[in-house]
């Protein structure tokens, strides 16, 4: 019971200190907020980015050709068209490209070019009168006139890409026809239609127009997250770890402070066993770190929607960080003679170990996952917590997180045993 | 015959080369106020620290109401209330919170704890400011709470280590009255001080310590007999003079002479403290000798025999050294 009394007294004092509260909660939450405001604008623009809609004028002068029409008639399952120009126009006006292209038709090629010159349109596509005829002739080349606004790059590039892919498909079909004609020795429209039909069937999508532009996002199991939230999540993770260890060290310093403020010797004059007093002080530090970690985890989730991973991973990581930070604090303070040494040692040791341990997070900003750096980071106790944090956020298997947790707990045991041994030697 | 409250047997403690406590032995009867008197560094606090089981003696033992400080420290602590020399309180907690926490450390719980905290707040005169944090209190108020903590469990024995150090006269008077009240309630008090007047006013028994040793022990009257009817004369002169020192030592009726720089030594004044048989007879001879040595006496102070005189007689130094 007295152990709990000492722990509660220490927690009360910690939570009454404005200085402690600022370091425990305000700064760890404030830094990610600052990152949000620093980089949020960039990320929001990135999120809102869309390809501009390109105005396209199609001038279909193609008069078709009998050979083409006969061949089309022999292709089953394909929308019939009188000319290849009509097919090209239909492809560009497909609903699939509605968010990329605003296609209008024009009868006069000069008027279409003038519209581009006047920047009323980005691209004019002029399909010549003999477009189908040239395509149907075995040894001729079908040519499309592509007239674009020279000040535009992305929009015309997209249109050109669509046309190129379509025409590549058509060229492939034409080559197949040429091969078939060379074998049979006659340009029979029925044979041509059959060859084209087989060619279409051999394409991956079974339809050459279907694969002209296929924009795909990475496979996701949950809604897409803004990149700023990913950055904030990483910063929040680093802040959580640094300040949890800070609190662990600061609360354990309470033992030295009480010694210097004469309350610890006075406690030892009461009929309370000294081991109970020290255990109470350790417990106070542990509970304070626990409260801090839980509040920060929940606050980060609610404010920044940080994805900490599954509840099992979060629980395991939380237990490990709480125990390790508290034990680390006891260990570091057991090496000190007085609180006067604390500032320099805490600043140096905490900064160095957190910096080393959190290297994977810092490198993560640069998109780098260097295995050597990851291995070096595990020299510091914080490194294993960072590893658990990242494994949790990346939905790694629980067994993998448990392995990291076991190593962290081993660190905890070493810190605790050495720290308690040294404090007992000093006070008991 | 009542058993002794405290029996101290040949305590030894040293820190490096310094013998902080060197073979100290004394007994304290139940219900009496026993003062350890001595200058700073005499070993008083080290002795109290051993008697409250904070330090382990290298040799010797002490029995506190029959509990050995070596073999039964928890038994010793359960009958003790310790008031340390320093303010040992949590400044960021209120007086009530401090008393409640310390009460729990002494094993009090529930309604008994609450009523005892209320009683102690009344005793120390801070009931109306009990909710204020300690850091807002004056030095005297803090001292009172510091004592209040040790009263919570109604201990049979109280140790007070220089509880009046650095406080205003009003608070000092209040604390001394509280200690006398404790004695009237039957509490045994072990009191350390370097203030001779406090020791004389409070104590049934006084032990004088210097350099870790107990150099004298007894009642106020018994200690006075050590110096007999000697008077203490303090003569201030305008410069240090070895000649006059030697000359005064040779004056008939002078038993002892020591010299020390005055607090306002910037003016070059030195105080010579003399123990003499009869100041009325000796004083004119001292003035004559000073005149012969061309030394000007700037002030004279004559005191009846007291503990200061005893200490001076025993150690050759003033107690405030």
Image (spheres, helix red, strand yellow):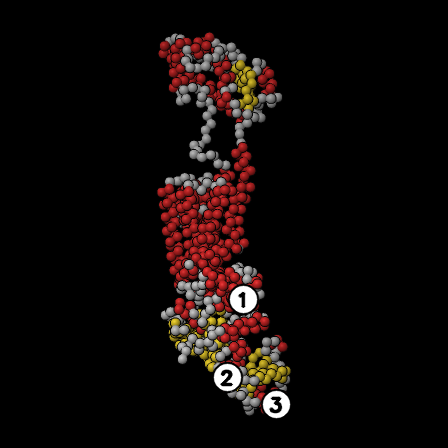
- Which quarter of the figure has residue B175? bottom right
Q: Mark 2 or mark 3: name the one nearer the start of the chain.
A: 2
The label on residue A102 is none
Q: Nearer the viewer, mark 1 or mark 3?
A: 1
Note whether residue A69 is visible: yes
Instruction: Tell me the chain of label 2.
Output: B
For the residues labelled 2 and 3, the Cα–Cα distance comes to: 30 Å
Q: Which residue is mark 1?
A: B122
- Determine whether, in the image, residue A22 is placed left or right of residue A273: right
The quadrant of the rendering that contains the N terminus of chain B is: bottom left
Q: Position of residue B271 (x, y in %)?
A: 58, 81
Front in this rendered view, residue A174 or A411: A411
C-alpha span from label 1 to label 3: 56 Å
**Which residue is at 43% across, 19% downward?**
A207
Q: Secondary structure at mark 3?
A: helix
**Residue annotated with mark 2:** B221
State the residue position of label 3.
Answer: B284
Label 2: which secondary element: helix
């Amino acid at each position: 019971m007295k152990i709990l009394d000492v722990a509660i007294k220490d927690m009360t004092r910690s939570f009454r200190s404005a200085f402690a509260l600022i370091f425990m909660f305000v700064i760890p939450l404030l830094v990610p907020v600052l990152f949000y405001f620093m980089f949020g604008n960039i990320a929001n623009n990135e999120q809102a980015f869309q390809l501009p809609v390109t105005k396209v004028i199609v001038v279909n002068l193609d008069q078709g050709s009998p050979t083409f029409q006969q061949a089309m008639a022999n292709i089953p399952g394909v929308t019939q068209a009188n000319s290849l120009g009509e097919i090209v126009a239909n492809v560009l006006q497909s609903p699939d490209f509605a968010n990329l292209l605003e296609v209008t038709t024009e009868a006069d090629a000069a008027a279409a070019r003038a519209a581009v010159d006047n920047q009323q349109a980005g691209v004019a596509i002029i399909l010549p009168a003999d477009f189908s005829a040239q395509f149907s002739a075995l040894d001729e080349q079908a040519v499309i006139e592509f007239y674009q606004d020279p000040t535009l790059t992305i929009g015309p590039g997209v249109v050109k890409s669509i046309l190129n892919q379509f025409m590549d498909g058509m060229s492939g079909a034409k080559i197949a026809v040429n091969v078939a004609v060379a074998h049979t020795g006659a340009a029979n429209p029925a044979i041509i239609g059959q060859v084209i039909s087989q060619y279409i069937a051999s394409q991956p999508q079974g339809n050459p127009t279907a694969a002209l532009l296929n924009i795909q996002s990475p496979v996701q199991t949950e809604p897409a997250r803004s990149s700023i939230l990913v950055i904030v999540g990483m910063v929040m993770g680093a802040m959580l770890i640094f300040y949890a260890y800070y609190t662990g060290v600061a609360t354990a310093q309470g033992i030295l402070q009480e010694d210097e403020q004469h309350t610890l010797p006075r406690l030892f004059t009461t009929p309370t066993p000294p081991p109970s007093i020290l255990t109470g002080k350790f417990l106070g530090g542990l509970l304070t770190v626990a409260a801090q970690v839980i509040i920060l985890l929940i606050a980060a989730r609610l404010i920044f929607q940080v994805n900490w991973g599954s509840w099992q991973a979060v629980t395991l990581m939380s237990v490990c960080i709480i125990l390790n930070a508290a034990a680390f604090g006891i260990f570091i303070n057991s090496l000190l003679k007085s609180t006067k040494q604390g500032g320099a040692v805490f600043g140096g040791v905490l900064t160095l170990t957190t910096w080393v341990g959190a290297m994977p997070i810092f490198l993560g900003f640069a998109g780098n996952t260097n295995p050597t750096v990851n291995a070096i980071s595990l020299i510091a106790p914080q490194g294993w917590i960072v590893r658990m944090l990242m494994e949790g956020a990346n939905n790694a298997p629980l067994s993998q997180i448990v392995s990291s947790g076991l190593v962290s707990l081993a660190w905890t045991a070493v810190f605790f045993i050495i720290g308690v041994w040294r404090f007992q030697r000093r006070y008991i | 015959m009542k058993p002794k409250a405290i029996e101290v047997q040949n305590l030894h403690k040293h820190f490096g080369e310094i013998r902080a406590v060197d073979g100290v032995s004394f007994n304290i009867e139940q219900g009496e106020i026993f003062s350890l008197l001595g200058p700073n560094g005499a070993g008083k606090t080290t002795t109290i620290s051993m008697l409250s089981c904070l330090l382990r003696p290298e040799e010797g033992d002490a029995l506190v109401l029959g509990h050995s400080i070596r073999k039964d420290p928890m038994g010793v602590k359960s009958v003790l209330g310790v008031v340390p020399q320093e303010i040992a309180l949590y400044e960021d907690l209120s007086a009530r919170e401090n008393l409640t926490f310390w009460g729990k450390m002494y094993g009090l719980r529930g309604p008994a704890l609450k009523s005892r905290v209320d009683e102690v707040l009344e005793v120390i005169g801070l009931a109306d400011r009990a909710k204020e944090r300690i850091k807002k209190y004056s030095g005297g108020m803090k001292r009172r709470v510091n004592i209040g903590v040790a009263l919570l469990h109604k201990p049979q024995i109280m140790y007070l280590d220089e509880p009046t150090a650095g406080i205003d006269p009003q608070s000092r008077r209040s604390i001394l009255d509280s200690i006398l009240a404790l004695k009237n309630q039957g509490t045994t008090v072990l009191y350390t001080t370097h203030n001779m007047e406090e020791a004389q006013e409070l104590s049934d028994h006084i032990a004088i310590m210097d350099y870790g040793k107990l150099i004298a022990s007894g009642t106020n009257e018994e200690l006075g007999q050590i110096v007999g009817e000697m008077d203490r004369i303090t003569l201030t002169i305008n410069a240090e003079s070895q000649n006059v020192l030697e000359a005064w030592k040779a004056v008939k009726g002078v038993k002892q002479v020591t010299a020390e720089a005055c607090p306002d030594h910037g003016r070059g004044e030195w105080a010579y403290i003399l123990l003499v048989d009869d100041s009325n007879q000796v004083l004119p001879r001292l003035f004559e000798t000073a005149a012969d040595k061309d030394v000007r006496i700037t002030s004279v102070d004559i005191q009846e025999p007291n503990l200061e005189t005893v200490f001076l007689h025993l150690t050759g130094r003033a107690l405030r050294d």
